[in-house]
Image (tube, rainbow, N blue to C red):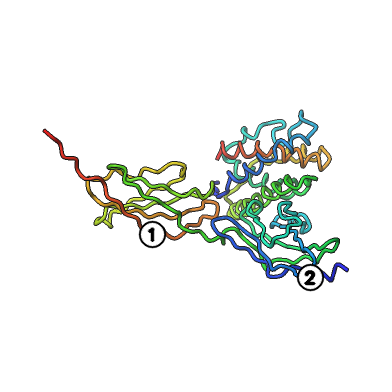
C-alpha cells in the first residue's frame, strides 16, 4: 500500500558520504554482499517496497548501528547522526505499518530472510560494518524506486 | 579530590537559524585555569547503546564556556548534552543540560535582502544562510496588493529574477526563510520597494 514518509535523504547521504571510505576500508570481505545477495534490491516488486523499506530500517536500527563503534570520534559522530535519522524515519514507517499500509508479500519476506541469513553468516562486527558500508545500496534503491 | 571541582551550571542552548550553541556558567577556582569538555547523546544512544555519550573533540578541554554543537545536532530527534570542568588533573562531575533539545525549536529570522531594479527587471539578492535554507519571496506591483506573486528561491549565490516591471512603476518585495528538514518558516522581512526605469523617449 502507499506510505508517504518525509525524510532528509540529503542529510543522511551527506553523513554517509563523509565516512563511506573509512567504513568500507574496514570490510575485508568484498566478495560478499548482505543487501544484494543473491538478488539486487532493484528486483523487489513495487508492492513490496514499503515492507522491505520498513524492515530494513528496523534491521539497521536494531542490529547494525550499535555494533559499528570505532576508535575514530569523527566516524562515531557521523554514525550517530545517521542512526538517529534512521530512528526518526523508522518511527514514521512504523505508523504506516500499524495502519496496514505496508503489507509484506511472499517475495519481500523471502528477501528479508536472505538478508538476515547473510548478516548472521558473519561475526556481528564484520556483518554490522559491512551492512553500514552498503548503506548507499539502500539509499540508491530508495531514491530510484520511491 | 574530584568532588571539590563543582559541575558546570546553567547549561543551555542558544539556537538561531539552525546554528546551535551550548553555553554554561564558568566554574571559578581561584588561581587556576578551568577548562571544559562537552558530550552529546541522541535518542538512538539512549535507546540502543546503553545511554552512551559521544565526545565533541572541538569542545574538549576548551577554556571558553560556549560550544558550537550544530554539526552533531543533525537528526530530527531529541538530544541530551552534558559538560564537565577540568582543572589540572582534577575533573568535576558531569553537569547535564535540563531537558532535551530538538533542532525544530531553533528560531528562524527573516533573510537579509536587497531588492534591485535593473532597468525593467526586478531582482532580489538574498543572504546565504546555508544549504538547509530556502526562501519564500512575495512581490507585487504597488497599488495591486491583492495580486501578490510568490517565488521559492533555493539558489542564493546570484540575484534571483522575480519579474519584468512596467516602466516607471513601483514594485515591493518581502521574504521569509524556510527550512525543509524541520518544516518551519521565519516571519517575513521588512518590505522593500523599488521603481522601474521610466519610459525612454524615442527620437523619431
| Outermost front residue | B31
Taking the image as shown, residue A38 lies to the left or right of residue B91, namely left
Q: Residues within 10 Å of mark 1 (few under 14, many from 20)?
A: some
Q: Position of residue A129 (x, y in %)?
A: 76, 40
Residue at position x 76%, y 49% from top? A66
Q: Nearer the viewer, residue A2 or A18?
A: A18
Left or right, residue B9 beside residue A49:
right
Is residue B62 shown to the viewer in this render? yes
Residue A94 visible in the displayed image:
no
| Label 1 – label 2 distance at C-alpha | 49 Å
Q: Position of residue B57 (x, y in %)?
A: 74, 51
Q: Chain of mark 2?
A: B
Residues B124 and B162: in front is B124
Residue B30's tag is 2
| Residue B92 position within the rendered picture, expressed as x and y whole percent measured from the top left | 81, 66
Q: Quadrant of residue A25?
A: top right
**As drawn, A35 above or below B128:** above
As drawn, B161 above or below B59: above
Count of numbered badges drawn on the protein: 2
Q: Which residue is mark 1?
A: B190
The residue that appears at 43% across and 46% down in the rendered structure is B153
* Number of the label disc, if any, that sits on residue A57: none
Amino acid at each position: 500500500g502507499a506510505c508517504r514518509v518525509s525524510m532528509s535523504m540529503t542529510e543522511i547521504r551527506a553523513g554517509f558520504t563523509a565516512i563511506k571510505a573509512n567504513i568500507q576500508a574496514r570490510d575485508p570481505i568484498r566478495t560478499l554482499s548482505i543487501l544484494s545477495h543473491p538478488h539486487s534490491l532493484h528486483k523487489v516488486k513495487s508492492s513490496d517496497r514499503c515492507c522491505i523499506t520498513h524492515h530494513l530500517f528496523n534491521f539497521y536500527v536494531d542490529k547494525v548501528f550499535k555494533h559499528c563503534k570505532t576508535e575514530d570520534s569523527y566516524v562515531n559522530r557521523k554514525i550517530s547522526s545517521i542512526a538517529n535519522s534512521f530512528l526518526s524515519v523508522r518511527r514514521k514507517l512504523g505508523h504506516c505499518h500499524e495502519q496496514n499500509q505496508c503489507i509484506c508479500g511472499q517475495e519481500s519476506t523471502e528477501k528479508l530472510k536472505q538478508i538476515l541469513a547473510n548478516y548472521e553468516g558473519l561475526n556481528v562486527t564484520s556483518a554490522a560494518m559491512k551492512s553500514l558500508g552498503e548503506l548507499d545500496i539502500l539509499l540508491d534503491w530508495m531514491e530510484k524506486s520511491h | 579530590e574530584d568532588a571539590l571541582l563543582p559541575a558546570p551550571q546553567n547549561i543551555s542552548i542558544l539556537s538561531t537559524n539552525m546554528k546551535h550553541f551550548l553555553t554554561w556558567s564558568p566554574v571559578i577556582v581561584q588561581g587556576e585555569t578551568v577548562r571544559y569538555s562537552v558530550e552529546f547523546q541522541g535518542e538512538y544512544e539512549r535507546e540502543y547503546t546503553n545511554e552512551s555519550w559521544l565526545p565533541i573533540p572541538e569542545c574538549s578541554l576548551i577554556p571558553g564556556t560556549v560550544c558550537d554543537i550544530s554539526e552533531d545536532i543533525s537528526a530530527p530527534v531529541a538530544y541530551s548534552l552534558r559538560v564537565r570542568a577540568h582543572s589540572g588533573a582534577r575533573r568535576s562531575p558531569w553537569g547535564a543540560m535540563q531537558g532535551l533539545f530538538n533542532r525544530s525549536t531553533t528560531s528562524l529570522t527573516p533573510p537579509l535582502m536587497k531588492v534591485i531594479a535593473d532597468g525593467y527587471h526586478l531582482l532580489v539578492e538574498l543572504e546565504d544562510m546555508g544549504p538547509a535554507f530556502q526562501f519564500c519571496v512575495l512581490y507585487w506591483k504597488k497599488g495591486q496588493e491583492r495580486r501578490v506573486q510568490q517565488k521559492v528561491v533555493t539558489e542564493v549565490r546570484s540575484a534571483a529574477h522575480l519579474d519584468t516591471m512596467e516602466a516607471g512603476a513601483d514594485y515591493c518585495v518581502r521574504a521569509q526563510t524556510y527550512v525543509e528538514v524541520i518544516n518551519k518558516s521565519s516571519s517575513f522581512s521588512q518590505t522593500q520597494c523599488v521603481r522601474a526605469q521610466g519610459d525612454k523617449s524615442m527620437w523619431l
